[in-house]
Image (spheres, rainbow, N blue to C red):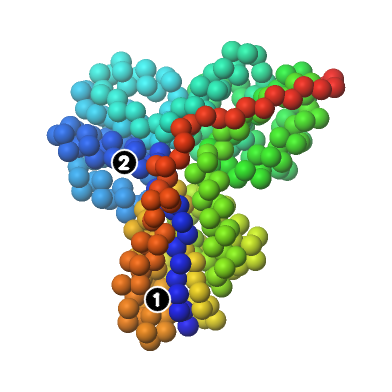
Amino acid sequence: MVQEVRIAKRTGFCYGVREAIDKAKEASAAGKATHTLGQVVHNEGVVRELQVLGIQTVDQLDDVDHGAAVIIRAHGVRPDVLERANSRGLEIIDGTCTWVIQEQRELRRLVEDGYTIVLLGTPKHPEVAGLLGFAPDAIVVDEEEEWEAAIPRRKRMALISQSTQPPWKFERLAAFMVSRAHELKIVNTVCPVTIRRQEDTMELAGNVDLMVVVGGRSSANTKELTRLCEIAGTPAVQIEGVRDLTDPTVFAGAVVVGVTGGTSTPIEDLRDVTERILAFAGTPETSSRAHELSIAALDRAATPAGRTTSLPGPTAPTVTISYGAA
Ligand code: SF4
């Protein structure tokens, strides 16, 4: 039976997602007709909460009335989307994450400098779609099996990444590309929040019997956390939220359980999952104190040092390697 549940440090919304949500709430509180272009966060509970505040999700700008406010979510958009919103007389509230803005600037520079650009990312992901607006000819690659066929040999090449790609994959691709170019420029835009979250999740996974990973089923960064738990040798269960926890037998044999979450998962969801695990799979003692223990677990995880807002500003490290002919 479960005696203890620990929540990973530095979880909850990443600063980009939190800022975009806050901007939407502020606009609505100021009495503006507020829309988000696409779901501001991949989390149904949060989207419902915003709907209650009168904030609507729209898939296209045509669904927004002239003069209304439209929030650009943390993933950012192509420049022509902003131009179109302007020309339709919409009030644009730009919630593009500062890190993503930095990626967009880097891409623009690489295009101007004439590099053949390889972008590590999930092809249809909204962040990647937005980035391609700044570098339409960039070659988007994802899984390792694709690299050989997709990446040409060129004199001057550059590598850049979608923010939430796993650091190990970026490093591997960089190593792969070394033999593909005479000059290779590496712009490491893997987000520090992603890296730290993965580190904290790995550390926790190494000290518990079972991990519960909370996040959207289609969220790549959530899936990566699950994969990392398994690499750490700890079985992991991935759920969207507390409602998915219906089978206490999953926790049979687990004494200490760890809980972590993706960048779109509110930290309160992790507390609720903690409470549920203790309530239905805990010892008689932990089960009866599930609520109180879950609050204590959250307090331990959400220390000031764990706040994503304490991260330094967005400066993407750049490495340029030049050597033998392509
Ligand atoms: S994961 Fe990083 S880059 Fe992406 S929205 Fe969050 S803070 Fe910004």
Please tell me which residue lies in front, 19 or 249. Answer: 19
Q: What's the distance in space between the residues labelled 2 and 1, CA to CA?
A: 30 Å
Residue 113 visible in the current orientation: yes
Rendering coords of residue 295 (x, y %)? 33, 66
Which of the 4 image quarters holds residue 142?
top right
Rendering coords of residue 200 (x, y %)? 53, 55
Rendering coords of residue 28 (x, y %)? 20, 37
**Which residue is denoted by mark 2 in the rendering?**
21
The amino acid at mark 1 is Leu
Q: Earlier in the sequence, mark 2 or mark 1?
A: 2
Residue at 59% x, 16% y is: 111
Q: How many marks?
A: 2
Element carrying mark 1:
helix
Tell me if 17 is positioned left or right of 24 in this view. Answer: right
Residue 136 visible in the current orientation: no
Element carrying mark 2:
helix
Q: Is mark 2 within 8 Å of ligand 1?
A: no
Please tell me which residue lies in front, 150 or 24. Answer: 24
The amino acid at mark 2 is Ile
Residue at 45% x, 75% y is: 4
Which of the 4 image quarters holds residue 174?
top right
Within 10 Å of the Cα at label 2, are there few (<14), some (14-19), or many (20+) other Cα atoms? many
Tell me if 49 is positioned left or right of 275 in this view. Answer: left
Residue at 57% x, 38% y is: 190
Q: Is residue 267 above or below residue 161?
A: below
Q: Which image quadrant: the C terminus?
A: top right
**Which residue is denoted by mark 1 in the rendering?**
278
Within 10 Å of the Cα at label 1, are there few (<14), some (14-19), or many (20+) other Cα atoms? many
Which of the 4 image quarters holds residue 53?
top left
Furthest residue in direction left, as rendered: 31
Please tell me which residue lies in front, 248 or 324. Answer: 324
